[in-house]
Amino acid sequence: MTAPVESLRSNLAGSGPPLFFPDPEVPAVFNFDQGLAAPETFPREDLTRLAKLVLQRDGAEVLDYFDPDTGYEELVFGYKGLREQIARRIAEKQGVDLGPRGVILTSGSVQGISLAVAGYINKGDVVVVEAASFPYALRFMEMAGADIRTVPVDDNGMDVDALAEILRAEGGRVKMVYTIPTFQTPTATEMSLPRRKQLLALAKEHSFLIMEDNVYGDLRFAGEDLPTLLSLDDTGLVIQCGSFSKIVAPALRLGWIAGQPKAIEALAAVRQDLGVGQWLARVMAEYLAEGLLDPHIAKANLVYKSKAETASRTLRERCGDFVRFTDPQGSFYLWVEIDERIDWDKAAKLAEREGIFFRPGERFMNDTGGRQFLRLAYSHVSEDVIARGLETLGDILRQCARVPA
Ligand SMILES: Cc1ncc(COP(=O)(O)O)c(C=O)c1O
């Protein structure tokens, strides 16, 4: 008898879980689940114009694997014109001059993360991550056979003293630290400047790579920018993920990893999907060249600011002291701790029945130590949905309180 196809799966495929989400039984009326850019901010007119412009201007080359003037390096690094624009912007904003060989274009930053893991991690190498982190990054590390260690995150971001403990215990086994220092997901915290410096000093002392995930770094609507790890580094041990997904539109599937060319070489060495699409890369090169990106981000941040305020205000007014959270200073999320007086299993079921969707805290961490968290993404839903959804959540929490408020 022929064996079923599932029995032929590799160990890796068999070890799931697939990172997509099952269809909900009820429609998501209040969808605070995925962290998506607001569709009303997508620059559709400019993208339509530029898609046509580059096709007409650059002819058949737009539809080819690579630009013949640059040659085969684009099969590995992607369209040079866009790498130059990204490198220029990094030089302007972060004061680091990397040049086009210091940028590799990827299909979303998530592919960049996978290349960095493939380029640096051997089975058994230790990778240190924040105790709640981006699940897709963790899965790539698991697939590479990394020994993943976690350090806690507090109001000042990653607890770097806890990292120092691991380094003392593990000697040279720590190969990489993956961190989201600016608008950490899911906790929305920021790593303080002293901790950023301390982390870099540890990298220098113990020689490990820092992967700085900066996909939310431009989405600030309150507070002051802190220098990135890349900008503070003088060792060449920092690589930084960036992406158009959160700041322009995710369907572009265009991200990048930036770093000193020597550090990027390892990613280039394991890349063999023949690069990113020329057409959209040229569209985005033109978008940057015309100076459209920064005004666009500034406008989008006003949208996120207003949505964040609506979400915080409604939570405060309608959920009272059953919830604890910090007002976000940027990005898409509120990280909400639910008070222990709430029967959260019951409340979560009722919320689902009302069509309120959010990302449960456990998805980001192995152990919540009995505490109950949820990540609320306010970015891509309307203010009306935010207000009505969180009002309904407040009613549910009151119903599920073990002791009345
Ligand atoms: C922290 C973080 N890094 C990277 C990504 C990947 O985004 P993309 O591959 O669309 O650039 C996401 C998306 O949710 C994210 O939250």
Image (tube, rainbow, N blue to C red):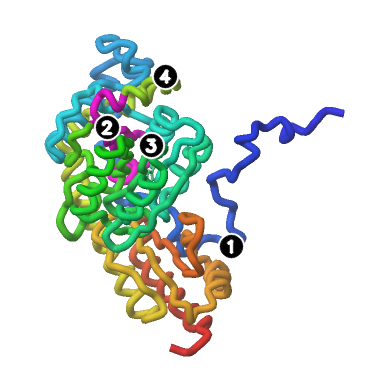
Q: Image quadrant for the N terminus?
A: top right
* Residue named by callout 1: 26
Residue 49 is at least partly visible in this image: no
Mark in front: 2 vs 3? 3
Q: Nearer the viewer, residue 244 or 54?
A: 244
The quadrant in which residue 245 appears is top left
* Residue named by callout 4: 274
C-alpha distance separating marks 2 and 3: 25 Å
Q: Position of residue 339 (x, y in %)?
A: 44, 77
Q: Nearer the viewer, residue 60 or 2?
A: 2
Residue 372 lies, with reference to residue 362, above or below; the image says below
Which one is earlier in the sequence, the residue at label 2 or at label 1? 1
C-alpha distance separating marks 2 and 4: 19 Å
Which one is earlier in the sequence, the residue at label 2 or at label 3? 3
Reply yes or no: does residue 237 show up in magenta: yes
Looking at the rendered structure, the secondary structure element under dot 1 is loop
Cβ atoms under marks 2 and 3 closer than 8 Å: no
| Highlighted magenta segment, given as a residue range | 236-264
* Residue named by callout 3: 172
Mark in front: 4 vs 3? 3
Q: Which residue reaches farthest right?
A: 1
